[in-house]
Image (spheres, rainbow, N blue to C red):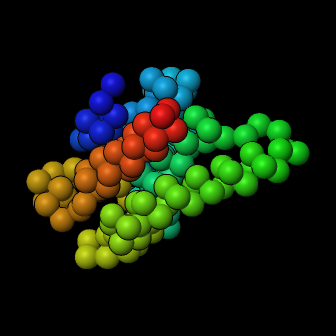
Amino acid sequence: MDHVQKAKELFLQGYNCAQATLAAFSDVTGIDEATAIKLTSGFGAGMGALRDTCGAVTGMFMAADMLYGYESPTDKEGKAAHYELIRDLAARFSEENGSIMCRDLLANCPKAKQPMDRNDEYYAVRPCVRLVMDAAAILDKVIEEKNK
């Protein structure tokens, strides 16, 4: 599946950044699309419009959790390795986009506590489509690297 294209399509359908990113990986995470969408429904606009961690990043982390996360609370090595992976994903996203924080990524966009209408004006000023595509591409690259 083309995860980048799927994330873009989901976002353009109206799903938030986290929903679009996690649901795009439903084919490999074991989470069905409907569950992925519901699970991430509060993470859009940087966690419920707080403009904290970007939803695309959150969705990317959740997909990585499902793919590579640890299960046992006593698995210190697994926990350390997974935290290292999450930091690596964050660094790659930040290197490409300048930050993982929604407030930084949308610094020049009007802030809204309520979901905004998705129209040409919305898409003209917000980089969110590109951000979900970037997050999906980064995770695809990590999956490819881990499969070698």
Indicate left or right for 79 with 119 as reference. right
Question: Where is the N terminus found, in terms of image quarters?
Answer: top left
Residue occupying the point 66% across, 41% down: 69
Task: Give the vertical position of 21 relative to 3 (above or below).
Answer: below
The residue most toward the front is 148
Q: Position of residue 122 (x, y in %)?
A: 19, 58
Q: Position of residue 7 (x, y in %)?
A: 32, 39
Q: Position of residue 116 (x, y in %)?
A: 29, 56
Q: Nearer the viewer, residue 94 or 116?
A: 94
The reply to whether residue 110 is visible in this rendering is no
Indicate left or right for 1 with 91 as reference. left
Residue occupying the point 43% across, 37% down: 144
Q: Position of residue 88 (x, y in %)?
A: 52, 58
Tag count:
0
The reply to whether residue 7 is visible in this rendering is yes
Q: Nearer the viewer, residue 124 or 70?
A: 70
Residue occupying the point 49% across, 60% down: 90
Q: Nearer the viewer, residue 95 or 49?
A: 95
Residue occupying the point 22% across, 50% down: 118
Q: Nearer the viewer, residue 61 or 112?
A: 61
The residue most toward the right is 74
